[in-house]
């Protein structure tokens, strides 16, 4: 069994398990059930019974009060029983299967003392053959009630799905056959085109006959004309709407309409799913492209910012190196010139003081050559000169130490600002 059939059977069981089907003659024919092959098995024996109705959980059968089945199940209601179903396959071969049950109720059938109706509850999920047949039958009737007015336009595709060979058909109006052309059909009616005057066709009792090629069966649909109008541009052709009698619509016709509606609905759902998947895939691709474009833009911006920062860093390092080099050169030149100036200044002063002292001594010597030299004054002048010379020497030593300290600090600063040099 294919996946599609398995899914359909599961859907039937989930949605229609409690829907009861009454086995009328028409329903027995549509379901292709053989009522003569229905048996009730209990305590090693089996007896024929009449199946009254069934769902996918409960079945009701009619047995005679004098039959062995009635006697056995009356002995002990908890006795397990099995109900045998029999359907006829499309090739004419019978299909048998048993369903395990328990007896939940026994009561007289319509007050009769000779017949009893026994309610059997299934102890497990029934076989797929029963689910498929009962489920499809219930689905047809459900769609007939809720989708009665949905019209199917007659064209090549719908004719192939419905199993109608041609759009030409026959309609009986007041028991007189007339040819017509199908325009559309539905569960509850049809629209046809035929020769005639609308006012003579309105409210007439009709019978529309359709031939289905897949079952090679002709169905007769009884109804009445509820509306008739002229075809546009023609005064001899009418288009009439037919409403079928609800209680006289054959199950075979319902089955064909339901099959088309469900297959068409399935195609619509599949197309919607495909379109949704395609749209989701396209949206995913667009989102992926947008994400990639965004990542590329962010990467480009990051690389640009990194390059700018690297350039700024290199420029800053170059500028710092240049400034450090200039700072290292300028203090050295300034220090040398200062040292020369400071060294020359004391020497100049000492020279000037020596020359001044010599000149004064010469002047005094020349002036008082004939006079007696003042020894005490001479000693005083000598002491003052030595004191001045000592002061100059101390000043020179202090300046030299200051100069050396400045030079050391400048050198250290240059090394710290330019560690690679």
Image (cartoon, rainbow, N blue to C red):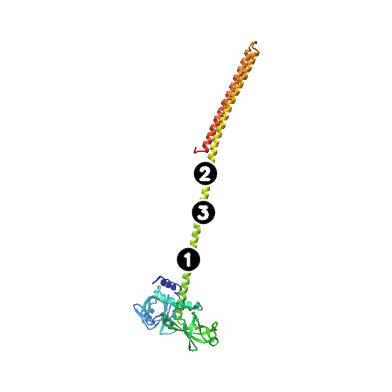
Q: Quadrant of residue 227?
A: bottom right
Residue 150 rendering spot, x and y as whole percentages: 50, 77
Cα separation, mark 3 vs mark 2, equals 24 Å
Decide which of tag 1 and tag 3 comes sooner along the chain: 1
Cα separation, mark 1 vs mark 2, equals 53 Å
Label 1 element class: helix
Label 3 element class: helix
Which quadrant would the N terminus be assigned to in this image? bottom left
Residue 106 rendering spot, x and y as whole percentages: 42, 79
Q: Which mark is residue 58?
A: none
Label 2 Cα neighbours within 10 Å, binned few <14 / some 14-19 / many ≥20: few
Residue matched to label 2: 314
CB contact under 8 Å: marks 1 and 2: no
Residue matched to label 3: 298
Between residue 140 and residue 337, name the one nearer to us.
337
Between residue 35 and residue 300, name the one nearer to us.
300
Label 1 Cα neighbours within 10 Å, binned few <14 / some 14-19 / many ≥20: few
Cα separation, mark 1 vs mark 3, equals 30 Å
Rendered residue at 48%/67% (across/down):
275
Can you say whether 318 is above or below 130 in the image?
Answer: above
Decide which of tag 1 and tag 2 comes sooner along the chain: 1
Total numbered badges shown on the rendered structure: 3
Q: Quadrant of residue 131?
A: bottom left
Residue 358 rendering spot, x and y as whole percentages: 61, 17
Residue 28 rendering spot, x and y as whole percentages: 42, 81
Residue matched to label 1: 278
């Amino acid at each position: 069994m294919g996946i599609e059939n398995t899914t359909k059977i599961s859907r039937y069981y989930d949605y229609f398990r409690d829907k009861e089907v009454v086995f009328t003659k028409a329903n027995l024919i549509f379901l292709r059930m053989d009522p003569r092959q229905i048996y009730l098995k209990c305590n090693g024996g089996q007896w024929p019974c009449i199946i009254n109705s069934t769902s996918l959980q409960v079945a009701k059968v009619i047995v005679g009060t004098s039959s062995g089945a009635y006697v056995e199940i009356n002995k002990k209601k908890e006795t397990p029983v099995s109900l045998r179903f029999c359907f006829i396959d499309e090739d004419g071969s019978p299909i048998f299967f048993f369903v395990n049950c328990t007896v939940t109720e026994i009561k007289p059938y319509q007050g009769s003392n000779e017949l009893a109706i026994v309610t059997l509850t299934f102890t497990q999920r029934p076989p797929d053959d029963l689910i498929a047949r009962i489920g499809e039958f219930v689905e047809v009737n459900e769609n007939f009630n809720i989708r009665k007015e949905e019209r199917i336009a007659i064209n090549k595709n719908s004719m192939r799905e419905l199993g109608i060979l041609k759009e030409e058909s026959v309609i009986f109006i007041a028991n007189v056959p007339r040819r017509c052309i199908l325009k559309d059909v539905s569960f509850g009616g049809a629209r046809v085109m035929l020769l005639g005057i609308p006012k003579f066709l309105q409210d007439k009792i009709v019978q529309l006959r359709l031939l289905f090629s897949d079952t090679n069966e002709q169905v007769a649909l009884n109804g009445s004309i509820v509306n008739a109008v002229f075809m546009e541009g023609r005064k001899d052709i009418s288009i009439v709407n037919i409403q079928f009698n609800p209680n006289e619509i054959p199950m075979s016709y319902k089955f064909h309409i339901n099959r088309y509606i469900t297959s068409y609905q399935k195609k619509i759902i599949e197309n919607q799913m495909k379109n949704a998947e395609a749209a989701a895939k396209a949206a995913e691709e667009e989102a992926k492209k947008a994400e990639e474009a965004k990542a590329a833009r962010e990467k480009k911006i990051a690389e640009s910012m990194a390059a700018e920062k690297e350039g700024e860093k290199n420029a800053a390092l170059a500028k710092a190196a240049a400034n450090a080099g200039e700072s290292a050169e300028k203090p050295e030149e300034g220090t040398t010139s200062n040292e020369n100036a400071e060294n020359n200044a004391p020497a100049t002063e000492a020279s000037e003081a020596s020359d001044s002292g010599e000149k004064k001594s010469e002047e005094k010597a020349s002036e008082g050559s004939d006079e007696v030299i003042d020894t005490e004054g001479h000693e005083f002048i000598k002491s003052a000169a030595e004191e001045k010379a000592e002061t100059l020497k101390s000043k020179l030593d202090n300046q030299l130490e200051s100069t050396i300290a400045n030079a050391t600090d400048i050198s250290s600063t240059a090394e710290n600002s330019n560690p690679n040099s």
